[in-house]
Amino acid sequence: MDGERLTLGKVLSAVGLVIIMLWTIFPLYWVFNMSIQTPIDVISYPPKFVFDPTLENYSVVLLGKSWLGKYETVQTDFPRYFLNSLIVCSGAVILSMLVGVPAAYSLARYNFRGKENFAFTLLSFRFAPGLIVIIPLFVIFRRIGFYGTYYGMIFAYQLLTLPFSVWLMRGFFEDIPPELEYAARIDGYSWWGVFRKIDLPLIAPGIAATGILSFIFAWNEFLFGYILSSDATRPVTPSLMGFISYEQVLWGQMAAAAIITLLPSVILAIFIQRYLVRGLTFGAVKG
Amino acid sequence: MAEVRVEHVWKFYQGEKGAAQRVEAVKDATFTCNDKEFLCLLGPSGCGKTSTLRMIAGLETISQGDIYIGGKRVNDLLPKDRMLAMSFESYALYPPMTIYENIAFPLRARNWSEERIRERIKEVSELLEIQDILSFRPAKLSGGEQQRVSLARALVREDAQVTLMDEPISHLDAQLKARLRIDLKRVQREWGLTVIYVTHDQLEALSMADKVVVMNLGEIQQVGTPEDLYQKPANLFVAGFIGEPPMNFLPCSLMKDKDHFYLQFSQFRFEVNSDIAHMMSEENNQKNNWVLGIRPADIVIGSSVGESYSLKARVSSVEHLGESSVVTVDVDGQQMLIEVPGLSSEKEGSSVSVYFGKEKAHIFNALTGKVIRK
């Protein structure tokens, strides 16, 4: 009786998991479907599950080729936007690591006046929705000439990634026993030597995990990219809006662009999955 | 190797939240560790011994006072410039490195050649019997092995002026502890190391140290050889802290009967000669507030020895510890421990007379804790 129930429970939980998975995956599947359909198939009703797949949406998006009058298209410079996203997100991650690692270290190791208030204020940037700051940021950026520049974008994106990085890495540093540093200092190393030879190797998985998570956050950002970029610096996420033209929405090309946009996040997440979990559970496996 | 002089050193910590009250972790500590001497800082936890050690190491700032290593004032020197070696209670091994790399770490900091490092590590690892685990990482080792590696990393430094040790063998099992005590002492002698060793275990201090600094509540209680501490404790704290089982204390009053002075505990009288009585009354003009201290091993059951004091007592329990027994007796409501060699044949509940030599008794001023020296 008990065994039966257990199997029934197992079956139910498996069914439940499948349902949740379908629920989660279906939109992605649908977008992917759209990306390999012709414009006619995309808007056909009832929706088609069987059709002749085509890669032409991708070639239009990536190569900017127009379809020789067969279908309508808009000229988008998608590879450029992709590169913009890479530049801005990498820049934001590098900046938040350069500033965040020392900040996290000092929050973890030193006592100074207003330390907790400082840390909390930093975190509170994350409480407010970006909409609250975007208008003032826009006005300021226009005034000081940051609007539409890579520097400006990196600075704005860093607002998202830095607080997150500091808080995550602070935890990693706190997990390193201070005695390790004391020992190395007595062993004859300067502060910098200790940091480089003891702290950095220990915290490397944490830095990698934090960096990648920050990158994914930044990559998925839409609002700052939409409002603060010019055409030359537009990242991928707002660029997807470009497929909405006067006459119609170019669903197929937009879907293809969306799939390409997804790729870096998915690839990063898959490749560093184990690393990521290890980084995030760093404190649980003290040596 | 070099001598270490600690002169009037204080350590204050500012209270939490900027409170006005400051915590005094070390108060006016002064002692000298001579060249090639094994000095123990001994005291209960929180007595300031580790703070003192860390100030010598340079891991804590010195709030007030001076520390000299080899005649050079080191207050403002960084730890790396003080030429010390140290082993930590928490081992503090570097997790990503192998044991070999861990031990080589301080030598590499000083640009030793790899060949010289290899030879030196061989020597030290043989001493501590860790040759077989040199290729492992610290996480794979047992606590005892980690502690030995931590010791090895401190001992590998030939050039260290002073070797500091913070409870280096406290996490080992009793057998290994006993062996390492002997090994450490031997190495210190043979290599002529100057060692400052922090421990809360009086056995470690008494068995290894040339000189012991007993601390309590941030203050140095007594500095002396292990024999001094045991035979001539300077105050009640040292008397009670050193020795196992601990010294018996009897609260007494100083009385005068005609020309004779005596200390009275309950119905029992212990005569003291007039010189001591005068010293006592100079120290403390109150009649009460005296403590008579006597070590469990200095008490004899049943027969008097020379010029001795005697008490009538009732045996309340007998504990056999192998080579000796500890008999607990009750003297008018006051418990006393008596250490008897071999198996004691005393019966619980029986009445006994106990004796102790006059010269073995220690007299303390209960108000200040200070001993009255004869």
Image (tube, coloured by chain):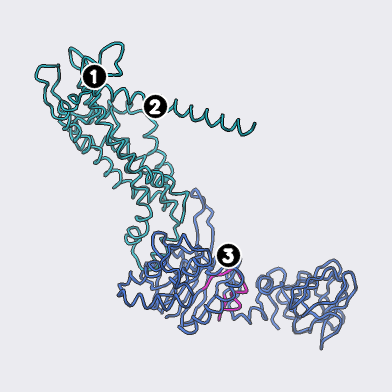
Chain colours: A cyan, B blue
- Residue B211 is covered by the magenta coloring: yes
Instruction: Tell me where residue A66 appears, x and y as whole percent.
Output: 11, 22
Kindly give the residue lying farthest to the left in the view shown: A68
Q: Is residue B30 left or right of residue A71?
A: right
Does the CB distance between marks 3 and 2 fall below 8 Å?
no
Q: Quadrant of the C terminus of chain B?
A: bottom right
Q: Which residues are magenta?
A: B197-212
Q: Is residue B335 left or right of residue B43?
A: right
Q: Camera-side residue: B231 or B284?
A: B231
Residue at 49% x, 48% y: name it: B17
Residue at 76% x, 70% y: name it: B286
| Amino acid carrying mark 2 in the image | Thr
Instruction: Tell me where residue B321 appears, x and y as whole percent.
Output: 74, 73
Q: Secondary structure at mark 1?
A: helix
Residue topped by disc 2 = A24
Q: Is residue B134 left or right of residue A223?
A: right
Instruction: Tell me where residue B255 appears, x and y as whole percent.
Output: 83, 75
Q: Quadrant of the N terminus of chain B?
A: bottom left
Label number found at residue A251: 1
**Residue B226: quadrant of the picture:** bottom right
**Residue B175: quadrant of the picture:** bottom right
Mark 2, Cα crowd under 10 Å, few <14 / some 14-19 / many 20+, is: few
In three-dimensional space, the C-alpha distance between marks 1 and 2, rounded to whole angstroms, equals 21 Å
| Amino acid carrying mark 3 in the image | Cys
Residue topped by disc 3 = B47
| Amino acid carrying mark 1 in the image | Trp
Indicate which label's residue lies in the foreground, 3 or 2.
2
Please report, as a chain letter, where disc 1 is located.
Answer: A
Q: Camera-side residue: A183 or A83?
A: A83
Instruction: Tell me where residue B58 appears, x and y as whole percent.
Output: 42, 66
Q: Is residue B165 above or below residue A224?
A: below
